[in-house]
Structures are given as C-alpha cells and as structure tokens.
Image (cartoon, rainbow, N blue to C red):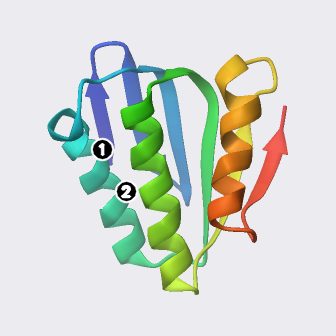
Amino acid sequence: MEVRGEGYRIWYEESTIYCQGALKLSGNSDYAPIVQLLDHIIDQAPAMITLNLRQLEILNSSGFNVLSKFIIKIRQKENIGITVKGAEATPWQGKSLKNLQRLMPSLKIEWQ
C-alpha cells in the first residue's frame, strides 16, 4: 500500500508506515488519500504499528493534524500499540513528536 505525490511518498509494509519527503499539502481534501491509507491500516488491527518519520523532512500543520487524528484513532482502539521513529536532526520533529505522545501516553518515540 502506497501513496505518492509531488515531493513525498508514504507506504506501509510489515507493520511499518514509512513517510518520506515533504508533506506540505494544502488541506483535508489533498490529505484524503493518506487518511484512507492510515484508516485502512487501523482497520487491519495489527498489534503494533511503527510510524517511521525519519525521512520526512517537512510536515505542515494540516499534515500534523492528520497524524494527530491517526494517533487518537489508535488510542481509541486500545488493542494497537505504536512506536514513532524520529530524527533529532529534523527541526520540526523534536518539538512536534512529543505532542503526539501527549495524545497517547503509551506511544513510544525512538530517536535517531
């Protein structure tokens, strides 16, 4: 499963969601294919999901909103765990990923 666009790629394989490039789409309708991919993954109800953001260089507020809603949906399922892999060298990740952990305290963050 994969979503590609200008400057970004998101794909899912072996319980890991990989995000790469720059996600700076203009709004909810542009993010709809990504939301559909994330919802499909939740519907599969894997015991654990890894969200690898280490290659995601840019994420705008609309994209962060999509990730936040994804984390909330996982939290509501109660039977799905999540680990987020981030890169400390990427400026937006240091501050923003901690906010995801506030939405779901059991979320684990692994830094590179």
Residue under label 1, please give it: 34
Give 112 or 90, whichever is nearer the viewer: 90
Image quadrant for the C terminus? top right
Q: Which quarter of the figure has residue 39?
A: bottom left
- The residue sitting at 42% across, 41% down in the picture is 11
- The residue sitting at 23% across, 32% down in the picture is 27
Q: Secondary structure at mark 1?
A: helix
> Residue 20, position in %: x, y?
50, 25
Q: Is residue 107 left or right of residue 21?
A: right
Residue under label 2, please give it: 38
- The residue sitting at 70% across, 60% down in the picture is 102
Q: Secondary structure at mark 2?
A: helix
Amino acid type at mark 1: Ile
> Residue 106, position in %: x, y?
75, 71
> Residue 31, position in %: x, y?
26, 38
CB contact under 8 Å: marks 1 and 2: yes
Q: Is residue 33 left or right of residue 107?
A: left
